[in-house]
Every structure is written in C-alpha cells, then in structure tokens.
Image: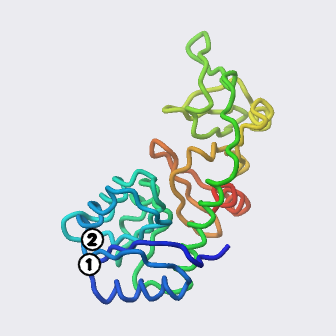
C-alpha cells in the first residue's frame, strides 16, 4: 500500500506548520486538495459532497476546533488530528480519529498515519462478514433465574477464578467457567483473545494506547479500558487494520 494520489485536506492556523505538513504530504505522494486556516471554513466546505480520502486537522484553531469538526464528520472521512500537546489523545481516539500526530511532525510518523488510513480503507472495502445471527445470545445469572444478553451489546468477557464475566453495560456473571467455552459458543463471531483472561469483541474497540513492555491499553465502548498482552496486541492491531 502507498499514498500515491491520495487526496487530502489540511486545516491548520499556524502558517509554518501548515507549510511543513503540506510539503510532507506532497513528498509522500498525496494530493493536497485544499487548505484552511481555521475550522469554520473547513466545516462549511464539507457541507457539499467532496471526493477526498482524509482530513488532517489541527486541534486548536479559531472559530471551530479540530475535535468539534472530527465529531461533525461522523466517520464520512478518515481524520488525523495534529497538535503540539498530548492531553487530547484519549478524546481523539474516542471520537474515532485514525491517528494523532504530535508536532513537529516527521516524515516517518506521517508515513505511519497514511498507512493506517490506507489499511482502514482496505478493511472498509473488504466484504463485510454477516452480522451475528439472532441466536447469538447467552444467559447470565439474575437472582434465582437467568436473562438472555445479546452478543452485539457486549464489549468483552473476562475469566476470574473459573467464572466468566460478561461486560454489557454492567458486569454480568455467565454460566461459563472458561473463555474456551465462550469461543466455542460463538464460533465465527469474531471474538478475539487479547490476554489469557480476556476476550474482546473488536467492533467494540474505540481506541488504543501504547503501554510498557509492548502491551496496549484498549478503550472500549462505554469507557472501559482493558490491557492487551504483548502477544495479543499485534493480533488486535491486525484485526483493526492498524
């Protein structure tokens, strides 16, 4: 995969930073379709149909900041956020930014961001697996009885002292005693083992953050954060197209 011919848009209020990013994008083979010195003009420009492959947004801009624009895009285009500060990283990935570049941006770091955009595009173009069938529900304990929970409402499963707990808005005790039983119950549903005691539903992942020792902190829908092991982290990145 390469970025040759990729059409991108850049919004950046610092003239030198804008010039540098445009140069790096062009050297990587991208076509810079438009540039904007502040957020409102980009927001207005995006109201019409546009044939672009990605947007590069500075977070701190006049009139409308990058996070507000990212949220308004609602997934129509891949978005990469740029900033001199790191404190917005979690919020950026929660809003489904493809990447988060710290200034001064280097060619190698920009190259990884472009690779992520291309990988996500390849995943989007691939045939979509069928949705889990209606019988993909499972029982959890509720008092002296059970209730059935939909797998698509579940973010992850964890095993603790031979009890499997499901996380579906709250922590629910299942009837299983091992994650192997969960995997066997949902063959073909795409559940991924990211740690010896954790199974996640990749569709529930909203963000990743590096952790010491090659591990990764995984942000899930609803705000929960779990840790992928050194062996599980590459599998998760591959499944997410990163």
Q: Is residue 156 above or below residue 56?
A: above
Q: Residues within 10 Å of mark 2 (few under 14, many from 20)?
A: many
Question: For mark 2, what is the residue?
Answer: 60
Write the residue at 56% across / 51% down. Answer: 226
Q: Secondary structure at mark 1?
A: loop
Q: How many marks?
A: 2
Nearest the viewer among 240 and 201 is: 240
The correct choice, above or below, for 197 with respect to 8 in the image is above
Q: In this view of the protein, which residue sits in the foreground, 179 or 236?
A: 236
Q: Residue at x 44, y 54 (%)?
A: 94
Between 202 and 195, the one lying in front of the other is: 202
Query: Disc 2 versus disc 1: distance between alpha carbons?
Result: 8 Å
x then y, percent, for residue 102:
42, 78
Describe the element under mark 2 as helix, strand or loop. loop
Query: Which residue sits at x=80%, y=33%?
Result: 184
Residue bearing the label numbered 1 = 13
Residue 120 % position (x, y) = 60, 60
Question: In the rendered view of the protein, which quadrant contains the N terminus?
Answer: bottom right
Decide which of tag 2 and tag 1 comes sooner along the chain: 1
The residue drawn where x is 41% and y is 50% is 74
Q: Which quarter of the image is occupied by the C terminus?
A: bottom right
Crowding at mark 1 (Cα within 10 Å: few <14, some 14-19, many 20+): some
* Residue 208 placement, left or right of 2: left
Q: 118 or 139, which lies in front?
A: 118
On residue 226, the disc is none
Image coordinates of residue 111 in percent, x first then y, are 57, 79
123 shown above or below 140: below
Residues marked 2 and 1 touching at CB (< 8 Å): yes
Residue 147, percent across and down? 59, 16
Q: Is residue 35 left or right of residue 63?
A: right
């Amino acid at each position: 995969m390469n970025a040759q011919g990729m059409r991108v848009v850049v919004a950046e209020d610092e003239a030198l930073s804008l010039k540098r990013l445009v140069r790096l994008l062009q050297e990587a083979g991208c076509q810079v379709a438009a540039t904007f010195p502040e957020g409102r003009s980009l927001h207005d420009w995006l109201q019409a149909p546009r044939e672009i492959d990605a947007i590069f947004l500075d977070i701190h801009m006049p009139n409308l900041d990058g996070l507000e624009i990212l949220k308004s895009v609602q997934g129509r285009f891949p978005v990469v956020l740029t900033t001199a500060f790191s404190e917005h990283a979690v919020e950026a990935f929660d809003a489904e930014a493809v990447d988060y570049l710290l200034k001064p941006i280097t060619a190698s770091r920009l190259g990884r961001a472009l690779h992520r955009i291309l990988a996500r595009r390849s995943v989007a173009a691939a045939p979509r697996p069928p949705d889990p069938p209606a019988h993909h529900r499972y029982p959890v304990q509720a008092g002296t009885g059970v209730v059935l929970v939909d797998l698509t409402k579940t973010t992850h499963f964890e095993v603790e002292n031979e009890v499997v707990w499901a996380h579906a808005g709250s922590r629910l005790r299942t009837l299983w005693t091992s994650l192997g039983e969960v995997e066997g119950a949902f063959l073909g549903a795409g559940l991924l083992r990211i740690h010896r005691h954790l199974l996640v539903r990749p569709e529930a992942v909203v963000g990743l953050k590096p952790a010491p020792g090659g591990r990764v902190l995984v942000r899930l829908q609803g705000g929960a954060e779990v840790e992928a092991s050194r062996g599980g982290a590459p599998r998760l990145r591959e499944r997410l197209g990163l």
